[in-house]
Structures are given as C-alpha cells and as structure tokens.
Amino acid sequence: MIEFTLWDIVRNLLLAARWTVVLSLIAFVGGATVGLVLTFMRLSSRRWLQRFTSLYVDLFQGTPLLMQLFLIFFGAAAMGHPISAWWAASIALTLFTSAFLCDIWRGCLEAVAKGQWHAARVLGMNYFQTMRHVILPQALQLSIPPTVGFSVQVIKGTALASIIGFVELTKAGTMLNNATFEPFTIFTLVALFYFALCYPLSCYARHLEKKLYDAGLR
Amino acid sequence: MGPTLDFLTLLPYVSELVKGLTTTVVLTVVTTLTGLGLAVAVAYLRVNGQPWMRWGLGGYVEVTRNTPFIVQLFFIFFGLPGLGIKIDAITAAFIAMTLNLAAYSAEILRAGISATAKGQLEAARALGMSTLQSYRHVVLVPAFARVYPSLISQAIIVMLGSAVVSQISVFDLTYAANFIQSRNFRSFEVYLLITLVYLLLAFGMRRAFMLVGKRVFAYQQGEQR
C-alpha cells in the first residue's frame, strides 16, 4: 500500500485546485459574455425579449445548481449526445453565472438615475449615444463590486462539478480521503484552499464597495 | 434511442418522491428557524460582544461565506468523526444548513442593525424601556424588517443548496431523484420533474415569507417603503 505524507496530500490538492480555477474562469468568462447579451435583451423595448430574460433569470435562480448540472449532463445523454463532465460543468456553470450577472447588471443600469436619461435626450443624444457616454460608464462603475463579489459564488459553485465526476478540489478531496482515511485533515485542507481562493476576492469586493460608498455613489 | 420523454415511468415511485419532498421541506423549515435564530445571536455578539468573541464569530462568518456548502457538509459528516465526533447524516445536514444560513444572515442583519439611528436607542431608554426591551423593539425588529427581503432570498438559496445533502445519503428530493433514475433509467425525466418541484418550493417559500412579513412587520410598512 502506498503511504501518503501530508505533502503528498497537499500536492495532490494543489494540482486539483488548478481545475477549480480553470473551471471558474471558463464559467465566469462564459457567464459574463452570455450575461451581457441577456442584459441588453432585457433592456430591449420588445416585450417578448424582456419576458424571456426574466423567465431565464427566474428559472436559474429558482432551481438548485446541482439540478441544472444533472439536467445538462444526463439530458444530453438522453438526447443521444452524451457529453463529458467537463462540458456539462462548463455549460451549466456558464448558464448559472449568466443569469445572476444579468440580474446584477440590470440592477446597476436601473440604479443610474432616470433624470440622466432625460437630460441626455434633451441634449440631443440618441439612445446609443446616451448609453455609451452617460449610462454605461456610470453603471459599469456601480457593477464592479457586486460582480467581483459574485465571482466568489462561481468558485464555490464549481465544487458541485465533483458530483458528476469532474476531478477538481472537492472531488480530489473525497478521492484522497478514500485512499488515506484522514477525513479531518483532508477536508480542513480543502476548505482552506477554497478560502484562499475566495477570501481575497471577497475582501477586494468589499474594498471596492466601500470606495464607491465613500465617493457618494451608493 | 431517440429523444423521447416518458413521465409515466415515474408513477410507481410516488412514495419515494413524497418521502424526499417531506425531508427537504422539514429540513428547510427547521433550519430556517434555527439559522435565523442563530443569526440574531451572532449579529448581536459581533456588535456588542467581547473582542475575542467578535473576532471568533467574524472568523466563523468569513470561513462559511468563503467555502462551498458541500465542503462544509463533508467536513461535518466525514471530517468530524475523524476527531471522534460521530454524527448521523440528517443531523450533519441540519447542522451544516443552520451554520450556513446563520453566517450569511448574520452579515445581512448586521447591515440592518447598523442602519439604526443613534438617537433612537437613547429615546427608548428615556421612555423607560429596559435594555432588552429597547434593543428588541428599536433595533432588532426594525432591522429585521429592513433586511427582510434579503433574508428571504438567503433562506431560499439555502433550501436550493440543500440538494447537496443527498451526497451524504440524506433521503431528500435529490436523493429520491437519484434513487428513481437508478431504477427506471429515465434520468432526464426524473431530474426535470424534481427541478420543477424545487422551483415551486422556491416560489412557495417566497410567498409564505411575504405573507408572514406582512403580518409581523405590519406596523413598519410606512418605514419600509
């Protein structure tokens, strides 16, 4: 039987943490892209587009991420196109992230005072000019702290990919536990790894929030 | 095999679905109450407690908010027995959900509490209210009313997150889904149905919370919005 030293455990977790980071990045970048499209669909004057996006957001916010993951993973297989855990996790987390970011960003756009729209229109700016020069720069500033804050939820969300067999930090932890029978040490280390990834982001988000608050924008 | 859906194959498993639903609902109701109760204590002590207490509770809140729920659950269920503390699955689920909800809610409540105007407590004391009375009526209840919508959302997030307790073999809704799909091999139909049940639960929870809020915080309506 192979003996595991503490260093072996840490090293294996570190290697697995790479995949947590990569999956988080995929989900965040993918989610931001889809989320941006959704946000503009939400702002559209077409009623059915607004309805579609709010239904989309409600569906993803009102169901467990684990179910979304299962539906995509097993759904694809049921439709005759089995996909790997990599793909299922990337797609599910991207969709999940996009719904939340769309909701956050819509809130930020709506938080820019209505009077600014009127003022810009009175100055003769059209819709796109108003968006580009007046609304977006302000909304962008408002949106950064909650977006950074949400990235923590994305990282934590990737832990669920372990359930469909994607080997990231949590799955590596359970695998190591099966090999070493040192659950306390291993799950403490796994938690510490997540904390090391998430806590700096949480602090940064809080710092940005405070800066906005001090600037009188919130 | 073509993409056909067959929901009739779920019919023989109604009792499993009911069992899973009951567990999820009971877990949610109980942990919402205990979690919010604990959150009040944590929020109070983080503001008024001894320095070591504030520091310790701050650590608890930060660790909980910055690690995944599934890891917290595994730590309690698999990790603690390593120290000689043995807990059965449903108790572990209950503890993990309570601690998770309490950490987030304490932070939400703290924001509500810090929004209390300074003079209000002094005014309450001047009116002859005891420390406890004034804290309850002037600080706590208005703070609750102020952040109530955020607390609802957080409780719903914990309910949805509870799908993970199936991984430590608690017979909840998700466990029922896994169980059924392992028997009838109709995974997509099962998960679709269960997802819908979760959606209805989330919707129902929001409605129930709002009804309760309307009654409990009736006299605060003017202040709220």
Image (spheres, coloured by chain):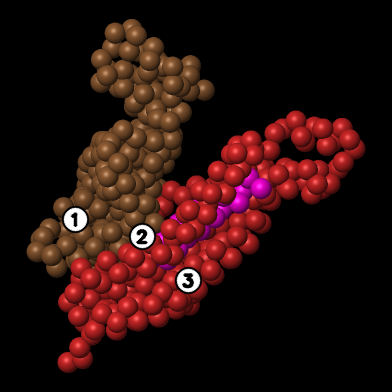
Chain colours: A red, B brown
Q: Could you tell me which quadrant the C terminus of chain A lies in?
A: top right
The mark lying in front, picked from 1 and 3, is: 3
Residue found at the very far front of the displayed protein: B51
**Image position, residue A175 (x, y; %):** 27, 78
Q: Is residue B185 visible?
A: no
Residue B119: which quarter of the image?
top left
Q: Is residue B79 left or right of residue A147?
A: left
Residue at mark 3 shares a chain with residue at mark 2: no
The span from disc 1 to disc 3 (Cα, nearest Å) is: 28 Å
Residue at mark 2 shares a chain with residue at mark 1: yes
**Image position, residue B1 (x, y; %):** 42, 78
Residue at mark 1 shares a chain with residue at mark 3: no
Residue for badge 3: A21
Query: Is B195 drawn above or below residue B130 in the view shown?
Result: below
- Chain ID, mark 1: B
| Residue span colored magenta | A141-160
Residue for badge 2: B68
Q: Amino acid at mark 1?
A: Ala
Residue found at the very far bottom of the displayed protein: A1
Residue drawn at 49 percent across, 58 percent down: A201
Query: Is A156 drawn above or below residue A54 in the view shown?
Result: below
Q: Amino acid at mark 3?
A: Val
Mark 3 falls on what kind of element?
helix
Q: How many marks?
A: 3
Residue B92's label in the rendered image is 1
Q: Residues within 10 Å of mark 1 (few under 14, many from 20)?
A: many
- Chain ID, mark 3: A
Residue drawn at 39 percent across, 36 percent down: B110
Q: Are the residues flagged by discs 2 and 1 in contact, CB closer than 8 Å?
A: no
- Whether residue B142 appears in magenta in the rendering, the answer is no
Residue drawn at 60 percent across, 60 percent down: A32
**Image position, residue B106 (x, y; %):** 35, 40
